[in-house]
Amino acid sequence: MSSITLTDVTKSYGSVQVIQKFSSVFKDREFVTLLGPSGCGKTTMLRMIAGFEKPTTGEIKIDDTTVSSGGKFIPPNRRGIGMVFQSYAVWPHMNVFENVAYPLKIQRVPRAEIKQRVADILEAVHLSQYIERMPNELSGGQQQRVALGRALVCSPRVLLLDEPLSNLDAKLRESMRFEIKDVQKRFGITVVYVTHDQTEAMAMSDRVIVFNKGAVQQMDSPMNIYRSPANQFVADFVGKINFIHGVASGGRIEFPGGQGMAYSGEKRGPVVVAVRPENMTMRTDKGILRGTLSQAYYLGDTNDCRVDMDGIALRVIAAGHTYGQIDVGSPLWLDFDEYLVFDDDGVDQTKILS
Amino acid sequence: MKGAGSVPVQASLQDNKGFHLDVKAMLIAAIVAFLLVFNVFPMAYLVFRSFFGENGFTLETFKRIYTYPLNWNALRNTLVTAGLSMVFGVMIAFPLAWLVGRTDMYGRKFFRTLFVMTYMVPPYVGAMAWLRLLNPRVGTLNVFLANLFGLSGNPFNIYSIGGLVWVLTTFYYPYAFITISRAMEKMDPSLEEASKISGASPLKTVMTVTFPIMLPSIVAAGLLVFVSAASCYGIPSIIGAPGQIDTVTTRIIDYVYVGSAEGLTDATTLAVSLMIIANLVLYVSTFICGKKQYITVSGKSTRPNIVELGKWRLPVTLMVSAFALIVVVIPFATVAMTSFTTNLGKPLTAANFTTRYWRILFTRKGILDTVKNSLISASVAATAGIVISCVMAWLLTRTRAKGRHIPDFLITVGSGTPSVVIALALIMTMSGRFGINIYNTLTIMIVAYMVKYLLMGMRTVVSAMSQIHPSLEEAALISGAEWQRGFRDVTLPLIAPSVVAGWFLIFMPSFYELTMSTLLYSTDTKTIGYELFTYQTYHSQQTASAIATGILGMVVIVNWILNRLTRGEFSI
Amino acid sequence: MKKLVVVLAAVLVLSCVCMAGAADKPKVTIYTSMYEDIIEAMTEVLHEKFPDYDVEFFYGGTGTLQAKIAAERDTKKLGCDMLMVADPSYALELKELGLLHPYVTPAAKNLALEYDPEGYWYPVRNLNMILAYNPEKFKKEDLPQSFKDFAYSEAMKGFISMSNPLTSGTALVAVSALKDKYGYEYFDKLAANRVMVESGSVALTKLETGECKMVMILEESVLKKREEEGSALEVIYPTDGVICVPSPIMTVKDGWSAHSNSKICEELTDWFLSPEGQGYIVKGWMHSVLKEPPAIPYDSINTAEIVKSAMPVSWENCLKERSDLRTNFEERVKNKM
């Protein structure tokens, strides 16, 4: 029953606009991820929802309450939001119990009830045995869960997470992803999640909003973001991809090296053909493009290869068992069925500039 | 980067509420008003007075004062002694701060307390001790060294520029030590680690990474030592007088003691030069280093890494011990022994031992009254000062309020202004001529102490505050706490040790302050610093030593109590 | 954390408690350069003698007090009601400035020394500038016996000390008298002998430790050390005459004074000049100003004898040439080093 409505929100610091006009509705129980490189404005967006920043223009509503618009502003402490910070922000002078109990104390919840609710939450985040510990006696992952517990203890309408996993090691990060997702389902809350890690975004979200340079690039389900990226930036930022520059005309795309491929789309002139490495197959008999296998790495589940196509290095990811079937240095055919064609405006969209 | 990005947060948060904007503006206005009335205006008037005598504008006084060779000598002496003290002070303080803060040297905590303790003791007490130790004829240490090395004469003469520099350095390096230590604590350890991983030796790392990064703090520390040494009166008046070495401060006080209106004008005219020098140094250092604030503050509470000294651990500890012995223990012990000695010409034997000076200390009404006065004025100055410091820390680290750097700047200027100048300026402007008459009251003392010592307190609190990641406070907000509540529950407990430390950094120098008190005291407001100085120079060195030892003892006891109560969390 | 607050609060409360006190009796504040020990003794006596008044002394060196008065003159109100400081030349100056309250005391007829016939000031204690040495370190016969030799004897080079005439009233009187007798050459000789210019207590310590052979100093400070500390330091009464400085007692005019209690000040003047009051002066190792002194200070010689052979001092010159003397001293002595 908690939605967040953003209408024409912008943010500027002086003359620098860091968020361009943004509107969207985050639905109840939806898991929305703000994805983008660092400095793209995603954290600023989150902090505006939290109330740490005020939008320069526009309106933010949580459910039917306007929390921020021209004249009206509700400070963060009255928004009933839970938030987990990138640096955890676990108070070093309070133990685990005191940290988690703090929001309840502020609300003057009776002692006995505080005890019970903190215990429940610590159970949920698997910290029950650490209740008396001080933060400096906890590992990073445990501190992170303290922060999560503290954010959840008041049963907030909305949970905001600001790169909560970026300080954890890979293994822990993966298990925490599931825990957070699990908690969201169990508590039935709306989550806004900020990350620069596309895997996290893919794994957890109902909807991903890709930001770059303060502007929304694409807003869609993880699958659509991956399979139908709106532009080169999204295509490159989410997942791995090969870009081959060429010129489209008369049902074909011609590449600089002299090769070409059939093309039935509408684009004409300079274009970029984008193919994901796992969508390419290496064959010895036939295919669309010719090349030479220049490198191959056996990674167990995959065979990670580089193919030289007239001086352009293309990455191909094949199944692990294909390793060794083609010798490095041998000529081969590349075949693919799923690819995208973008207009080539001469600007290198893949450079992450912000 | 996140941390830096978060700074504007609360600013923008509070900008949204007109009420808070007003609070900030009002706070800034209040602090600025205080500084304008008690700092800027008096100084400006002082300059004005030196040009405008009784009969309108004149350069006569200026000409007279600045063509007098004795004054030029004094000016030169001041620049030389303060300059050298600054150089040596920093040269001592930097390695000490590094050893105490960043290495596994034995007894780091003990040494830290010992060095900071020196700050808590009146500098002229040191002058008294060194006078006895290193006077050229019968100085105890001099004679000892001469015998030890079979020298024909005594090696040192304390009544010289060198002697003056020595005593100034040994008593003002703690200012640099405190400033540099604080910055060391703030430095991100990974910067040093990066250098080590690149193959640099610990020493190389210090020279190529730590030192350059610390440069702004080192310059600030040096400036503090320079100004303190240049505006010091006690040490040059005790060490310099017998050797006929005048400094600008002793000249100014001489002029004041001429006891006529003309003398006062002469004093102010000479004071202007000291003020200009101090402000010039201040300006240049801010100009050079102001933009280079590249101290990296880490958001996470990582402890600075500890450099293992390895085979150097013991030798280095021994060297530091030797330094502490010479600079701290021997002079303090000398003073303590003096307080029990009847005849200073003879060794301290049972026959020559007396406790009468201690009895005087605890029974004489005059002394007890001054202790009371100093306690009151110093605690009020420290308390008011620390409140301003906390507000400034909040304004500087958590807001982007317009004009928040104005009070910061004025506070720095105030502390950079020589004590004599502050006192003279306050006398002239605060004795009723301009509607405010606080002369002859404790208030004028309090004001003077605040103007002079606010900086140390403010820097301490600001530094502590900047180490608290804003997200800790934001977490309180998002937990539903009003910002006041969050400040109480989160920020205050975290900065409390620094607040107490800052309180003491204002309290102690105010408590034993001499230079300003010499000019500002009145019948009812004599302070212990001044009393100590009069005993030293006019009545009895032994009583003076007893007072000094008493102050030192008080500092040790208070430190011990605080340490106990806070379970080691806080010590001076 | 909580405990810390408690401790700080306790400190504050304590200091506030200390602030309380002081009854509402008519008050008289006296600026004086007498030793604190003497002040303490006198405060007690005055408390008994004048139980209805609150008499308070405020100690300061002569220079300090003069500077203070100069600054206070600017505010049109002094911090005191009476002065027992400096020398007659300063009394002349304050009289000129119209700051003093005239009172003709019946005790005047008993005075052995010059006083103001209009009653603006009376001498109240006789201070003697003498030479002192330490018999435990040096022999008397090896040392100068006169002020002249003190400055002129080359054997003394680097071993002598005196107070600063810029800050000490008695030292200024002394250099004035010596200038009148020997000319400014005397200053040059002091400089050539590398005289150390420093305060009395430091100088005495240097005598004790042997750092100095001889110092020009007030008799009282040596006598005090002898009586109180059993010190061996001895006085040499210079053959060219002791320099006597009769320090005056003055009352500040009502309106200018701190409490405008001039009637009480008159009573106090009478007492200070009475044999009883003078007895306390003598106990403070200073000489009485009466024709018939109640006693002589501990270990000293007859007051009349000292006064008889004293070096003449011109108070007019002292006042007129004050800044000349200071400048000359600065340039000839201090600037020489």
Image: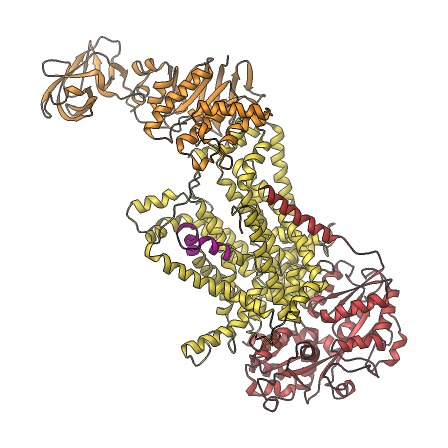
Chain colours: A orange, B yellow, C red
Residue C132 vertical placement versus A269 (above, below): below
Towards the viewer: B195 or B416:
B195
Residue A278, located in which quarter of the rendered image? top left
What secondary structure characterizes most of the magenta part?
A: helix
Position in image of residue B269 (x %, y %): 62, 61
Q: Residue furthest right?
A: C106
Residue A267 vertical placement versus B336 (above, below): above
The residue sitting at 60% across, 25% down in the picture is A108
The residue sitting at 84% across, 56% down in the picture is C24
Along the horizontal axis of the image, is A152 left or right of C188? left
The magenta stretch spans residue B175: no
Along the horizontal axis of the image, is A282 left or right of A271? left
Quarter of the N terminus of chain B within the rendering: top left
The residue sitting at 71% across, 64% down in the picture is B363
Residue A211 vertical placement versus B505 (above, below): above
Q: Magenta residues, as a range?
A: B94-114
